[in-house]
Amino acid sequence: MKSSAGHAHHKPSRAVAVSASGIATSTIHSRSRRALHAARTASTARLSVLAADAGHCRGADLLTARSDVDPERLAYVGHSFNAHVGGILSAVEKRIGSFVLMAGVFSDQEFVFDSNNPELKKFRDRTGEKPLREFFQKYAFDDPVHFVRRSAPASIFLQFGIEDKSIPETFARHYYELFSEPKRISFYKAGHALDTQARLDRVQWLAERLNLMPVDATAVARLPQLK
């Protein structure tokens, strides 16, 4: 039997843990959104998303070139910034049939103009509404809201923490509505990094989607938390 292919962005320890179940992984190194905010121009940050998506497409090329990988069973796993990248990827990389997207923002302009977020209000006051609107118009290619409606036929699993102050539940449910069917959403009593139950749920979902051998739940529970 050919191995399943997990096309995922995750730390090496997670890749090692799932490899025992016959999963080939392609781990793409990308800078965190926090790092991009620390040292970047707006154009550099937006182009980094294009580079990340291109890297994942190349990862799919490499996986499907392997004789021991089933090209019908590719999946993507991304958290936070990489969930954002995955939202765009779901529309443009149709070889990937399953996406787990965790604690991601899938409508950037809506997020930045959230009237209930005091930190973002300070940011808007400093920057000005007109430059921000122009920015989102110029870099529309980086906003998942323009892509996620075309996620079908891929299956989408969204995971959010109800204690994640940066992404209110109302936003999360709205993001869910934006994606095409088939899709699923789950909430956890956790913050942005989610928790052990979320980790177990996504592993089980992937095992069902990709027809994998059973994954050791105890080993999965011992994996380090996301940050």
Image (cartoon, rainbow, N blue to C red):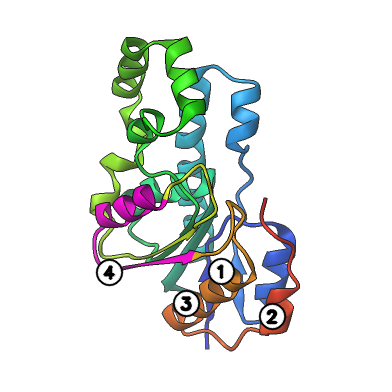
Which one is closest to the eye, mark 2 or mark 1? 1
Q: Are marks 3 and 2 in contact (CB under 8 Å)?
A: no
Q: Are marks 4 and 3 in contact (CB under 8 Å)?
A: no
Q: Where is residue 19 in the image (x, y as percent from the top left)?
A: 67, 75
* Precedes in sequence: disc 1 or disc 3: 1
Q: Give the range drawn in magenta.
A: 169-187
Residue in view at x 52 percent, y 77 percent: 4
Q: Where is residue 54 in the image (x, y as percent from the top left)?
A: 46, 42
Q: Name the residue under label 4.
A: 182
* Precedes in sequence: disc 4 or disc 1: 4
- Which amino acid type is marked by label 4? Pro
Which element carries disc 4, helix, strand or loop? loop
Q: Mark 1 points at which residue?
A: 198
Q: Does the magenta stretch include residue 16?
A: no
> How busy is the neighbourhood of tag 3: few (under 14 within 10 Å), some, or many (20 plus)?
some
- Place residue 24 in its image quadrant: bottom right
- Which amino acid type is marked by label 1? Ala
CA gap between label 4 and label 3 equals 13 Å
Which element carries disc 2, helix, strand or loop? loop
Q: Name the residue under label 3.
A: 205
**Left or right position of 29 against 74:** right
- Which amino acid type is marked by label 3? Trp
Residue in view at x 62 percent, y 38 percent: 32
> How busy is the neighbourhood of tag 2: few (under 14 within 10 Å), some, or many (20 plus)?
few
CA gap between label 1 and label 3 equals 10 Å
